[in-house]
Image: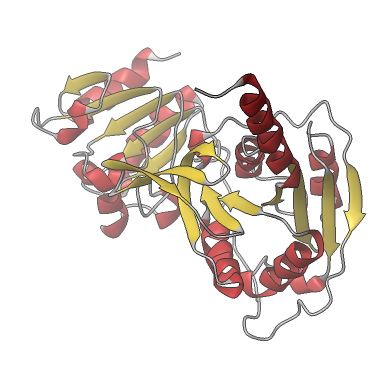
Amino acid sequence: MFSPCSRQFTSQFTNHLKRLQSTLVIAEHDNKGLLPITQNALTAAKKLGGEVSVLVAGTKCGPAAEALSKANGLSKVLVAESDAFKGFTAESITPLILATQKQFNYTHIVAGASAFGKALLPRVAAKLDVSPISDVIGIKAPDTFVRSIYAGNAIQTLTANDAIKIFTIRGTSFEADALEGGSANTETVASDGCATDLTVFLSQQLSKSDRPELTSAKSVVSGGRGLKSGDNFKLLYDLADKLNAAVGASRAAVDAGFVANDLQVGQTGKIVAPDLYIAVGISGAIQHLAGMKDSKTIVAINKDPEAPIFQVADYGLVADLFKAVPELTSKLT
């Protein structure tokens, strides 16, 4: 057994290590405001202990930085504004992160496991010669992380031995930070050397919809190959409008050309965890389940009683979707 003196020393040593730790969160935003996954990343960063700072890089990102400065428990918000960051390319932001890490000696660098984070942090890790950790769903200690593998069929707990830990977090596994109660200082960091001709941002076209954004919606209605055509997705749009829900799709439906790939839910699509997830005509392949199995309530509508989706559903309806969905929609006011 440890003596009281030993326990006191261990506690003091642990607190000292926490003081030495510092985490840099890479903010994801559109210059006008933060994307929700940044708030999830803040929550994850605070679980590590030590100081937490946020880096905001963009062209005119003042509103995003201002929102972050209100978060409780932040050491500082670092802001880098330059035309070099137009389009938020990994090639331009990587040098900025490397310079910031060198200046402040951060022990951890974290971002959301979005398309942005997945493109950026592996490049940063390669430059720092460390191993990145992807899709973290839990933090047990500053060097011990839990992540989902094999399409969610197994959970891995690993210890990172690198001096600098670089990881992405699954947004659905961490509560969103409230962004209130704080008043962090905002500091400007230089963006020298960030311009590059390796990748040139030309333009982007964003699909516009009156429905909620898929990854942040409280209700999601998703369709699969059972809908048979893209025109039949109107059944789901009508239902979604009654529920104020977002519309998603399985990879099979996307590959068949029924809907655009930005609606894809699953391991290679978007990860969602709404309060209500309605799966219509979706068989329930493990790749799809990996993207929605953390939903609080799952409802499945499928004419095949043996469909795997029923194994994870809280409520299941074995029925012809072309009859069941219109009837359900008509009963909603």
Quarter of the image where the C terminus is located: top left
In the rendered structure, the answer to whether residue 218 lies left or right of residue 331 reads: right
Compared to residue 280, the image places residue 327 above or below, namely above
Compared to residue 234, the image places residue 128 above or below, namely below
Q: Residue at x 76, y 60 (%)?
A: 57
Compared to residue 46, the image places residue 6 above or below, namely above
Quadrant in the picture for residue 43: top right
Most foreground residue, 66 or 121: 121
Tell me residue 62's x, y (percent).
86, 51
In the rendered structure, the answer to whether residue 71 lies left or right of residue 229 reads: right
Tell me residue 69's x, y (percent).
84, 40
Coloring applied to the structure? secondary structure
Can residue 70 be seen in this snapshot? yes
Most foreground residue, 170 or 17: 17
Q: Residue at x 23, y 42 (%)?
A: 227
Quadrant in the picture for residue 31: bottom right
Q: Residue most toward the bottom?
A: 197
In the rendered structure, the answer to whether residue 118 lies left or right of residue 9 reads: left
Q: Residue at x 91, y 54 (%)?
A: 187
In the rendered structure, the answer to whether residue 180 lies left or right of residue 245 reads: right
Most foreground residue, 68 or 150: 150
Tell me residue 36's x, y (percent).
63, 40
Q: Residue at x 58, y 64 (%)?
A: 120
Tell me residue 310's x, y (percent).
19, 27
Most foreground residue, 70 or 315: 70
Compared to residue 149, the image places residue 100 above or below, namely below
